Amino acid sequence: MEDTSDLLKQGMKVLFAVHNRLFVADMTIAKAGQPTVAMASRFAEPMLGMLVGHGTALIIQKPMFLQMLMGMVTALSSCY
């Protein structure tokens, strides 16, 4: 079994790799002449990750949440 400090080190490596990739992508977008899109991406990507993470946790923990979510999607799709 791995030590907690080893797991923490591996997690930090993954976190650094993900954020490094996002930083490089945003710098490329800014240099291509879209600095507003790059700034929006810096804020939107972490928020999307949190929303997906919390949503997944809610669906796993409370299956009723999935039924409510599907009902909302059905109601919104019938509007169009």
Image: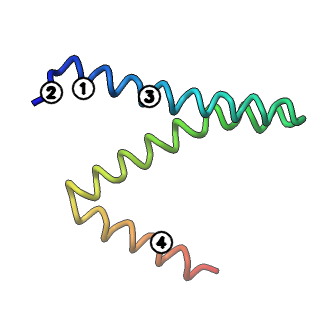
Residue 62: x and y, percent?
21, 58
Which residue in the rendered view is the most extreme toward the left? 1
- The residues bearing labels 4 and 3 have C-alpha atoms spaced at a distance of 32 Å
Sequence-first tag of 4 and 1: 1
Q: Residues within 10 Å of mark 2 (few under 14, many from 20)?
A: few
Front position among marks 2 and 4: 2
Residue 45: x and y, percent?
57, 39
Using residue 27 as the reference point, say whether residue 46 is left or right of it: left
Is residue 2 depicted above or below 76 in this figure? Answer: above
Three-letter amino acid code at the position of disc 1: Leu
> Which image quarter: residue 9?
top left
> Does dot 3 land on a helix, a strand or a loop?
helix
Residue labelled with disc 1: 7
Residue labelled with disc 4: 73
Three-letter amino acid code at the position of disc 3: Leu
Quarter occupied by the C terminus: bottom right
- The residues bearing labels 2 and 1 have C-alpha atoms spaced at a distance of 7 Å
Sequence-first tag of 3 and 1: 1
Residue labelled with disc 3: 15
Q: Residues within 10 Å of mark 3 (few under 14, many from 20)?
A: few
> Does dot 2 land on a helix, a strand or a loop?
loop
Sequence-first tag of 2 and 4: 2
Sequence-first tag of 4 and 3: 3
Residue found at x 24% / y 65%? 64
Is residue 78 depicted above or below 11 in this figure? Answer: below
The image's mark for residue 2 is: 2
Quarter occupied by the N terminus: top left
